[in-house]
Amino acid sequence: MVAGVGINRNLRARTRPAVARRRAAVAVQIAVSLTVIIGFAALTVDVGAMYNAKAELQRTADAAALAAAGMLGEYGLVDPMDAARDAALEFANQNTVWGQSMLIDRDKDITLGRAHYDAQQNKYSFAATDSLPDAVRVRVRMTNDSMNGPLALVFAGIFGSNHTELTAEAIAMMVPRDIAIVADLSGSMNDDCELRNVHNHQICLFDVWAGLPKSKGQAGIYAGSDPLEPGDPGPGDLHPATGPGLPGHYGGNPNPFNEAFDDSEDHGPRWGWMTTWGTDLLPGTYDPVADTGLYHLPRYQDTTDPEVEQNLIEAGYSAAERDAILSSANDSSTTYYRNRVKVMLGLAGWHSGMTAGKYSSGPGNGNSIIGDGELVQTVDYPFSGGSWNDYVNYVKGNSSMTSGDSGFKYRFGIKTYVNYLLERKPQHSQTAELSLTPAQPVHAVKEAVQHMVDVIHALETLDQVSLEVYGQTVHHEQDLTTEYFDVSDRLLDMQAGYYDTWTNMGGGIAQGVAELTGPRARSASRKIMILLTDGQANVNESGGCGDYTGGKAYALAQAQVAADAGIRIFAVSHGYGADQYTMAQIAETAEGEHYHAEGSIEEYSEELESIFQLLGGQRPVELIK
């Protein structure tokens, strides 16, 4: 038993040093492991800081490049390139990296250039240039030689490194656009110049008249001058409506406010005895009843205007003839009333057949009725559409002109005739010469589009532009093209009511979508539609006219179609009484913007030009690196 006990003690004595040695070994292993773990922890923290800093650095470079590229399209600025550099500096500084605001070098870190599209690879490359740049490359650096210095590390000093250098680069470009200009050429694009609005704002009817070719007033008129002074009528061909007019005389027009005749004045044509403009069209004070340029020739009432009677005297009509012409005794017949009005306006002569009458021979039967067959030396109607009979019916009837002021009824003269052309005969097939005049608001639209084209051309962009127009029907006028002036020149040749007069806005939008999604559109371009109209849509999806509710619904539905196709619509409303609400809805639907030009004709013309200058340079930007 004693011997056994001794053996156990010896065993215990021998095992204690082994356990101690094992514990010491574990302690060493733990110490070594902790060092490695701490090292890995330090590495993890610093690597994480580097990754986060790199991401923030790239975000800063992206923001600065996008901001800079966006300024290159600011055509109205004195120097868009300086503005681009300023924007890059500002946006870089507004961003922080690891809590530090970033600074970039204006000369070393910002490079302007142009982007070039590689169709095979379907991507853009960048080439540095200060000649009309459309792209910007921005570097944001945390390096030893940068203004930001290198990135400070937290634990890397354990391994002998306290800092690291990081750089991020981004390239942003102004993306080429496919632009469909969709222009409203309905009849309402003349409204702001018409007499219906004479009490609402200053209308430009005089300018429309002055824009018509003088040659359109030569027929039957001696140089378009006023009747001679009272006295001997003289040779018949020296008086209005008594002769064909002297060769080479185009009507000419005196000073518009009844001053001395001067055929060098650049005013419009004159017809018969409608030879003077009369009273200025000042809103708030104008009264057609007192207008010295309008003859009052009422139906069912004898004409008492002394100037009319004087014109007849000077033309050589006898007293008996004058009495018949001025009398309303036969006005129950529309034909007889129209005939005597044409004679009183000098648009035709009357061979009455009366003794001692103006004409010595001819078809007259000697009574006091002015029949169709008794009209001689008639002034040819000057334009392709309309007639003098239709003009007389217009002035004696009810129209938008008379709804604006009832005093225009039965008042004949240059003002009401030019208004007749604008309201009743605006189509190119009827009065093509209206395209030469500054009828509003269509003229302001033409000039605004010209300004936009000038901007796009000056920037030497890669944009394409098309022209779509609509009235009641819709017409594709110009394919997507880089020949921008083909677009503006075509629009300049057109006029309000060019094809027809209703307003098919929905059809116009649909035509724009068709061009922007067709074979001429480019996959790498942004799709933009510029919709120009007063917003008064009145043609529904089925083609029904006069349906304002259905017309609006059709336009909004097509705006959604555009949005689904990735097309943004910039809706530009203009003109007196424009439906801004509908236009704003269309822009919102198609993720675009709504602009509105308002005020006087002069004011909204200037606003439209500013809007289109902005649209010409306001190109979308995106990162290409």
Image (cartoon, rainbow, N blue to C red):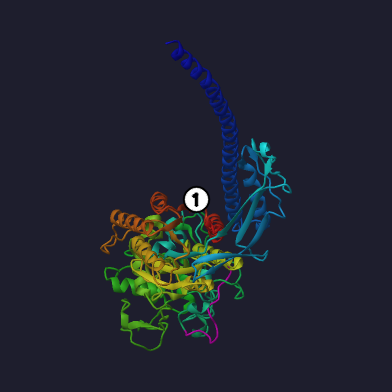
Q: Position of residue 212 (x, y in %)?
A: 50, 73
Nearer to me, 37 or 397? 37
Quarter of the image where the N terminus is located? top left
Q: Is residue 257 visible?
A: no
Q: Position of residue 469 (x, y in %)?
A: 41, 67
Q: Which residue is mark 1?
A: 284
> How many badges with numbers are in the image?
1
Q: Position of residue 487 (x, y in %)?
A: 49, 71
Furthest residue to the right? 145
Which residue lies at the image location 32% right of the left edge and 76% below the top edge?
Answer: 368
Image side of residue 541 versus residue 381, left or right: left
Circle 1: residue type: Gly
Q: Does residue 582 belong to the magenta stretch?
A: no
Image side of residue 551 versus residue 516, left or right: left
Furthest residue to the bottom? 361
Image side of residue 612 versus residue 386, left or right: right
Secondary structure beneath label 1: loop
Q: Which residues are magenta?
A: 243-255
Nearer to me, 468 or 241? 468
Q: Is residue 64 visible?
A: yes
Residue 77, image quadrant: bottom right
Task: Give the main secondary structure, helix, strand or loop, of the magenta stretch.
Answer: loop
Q: Is residue 547 above or below residue 211?
A: above
Q: Is residue 99 above or below residue 70?
A: above
Q: Residues within 10 Å of mark 1 (few under 14, many from 20)?
A: few
Furthest residue to the top? 2
Quarter of the image where the C terminus is located? bottom right
Q: Position of residue 175 (x, y in %)?
A: 53, 61
Nearer to me, 40 or 446? 40
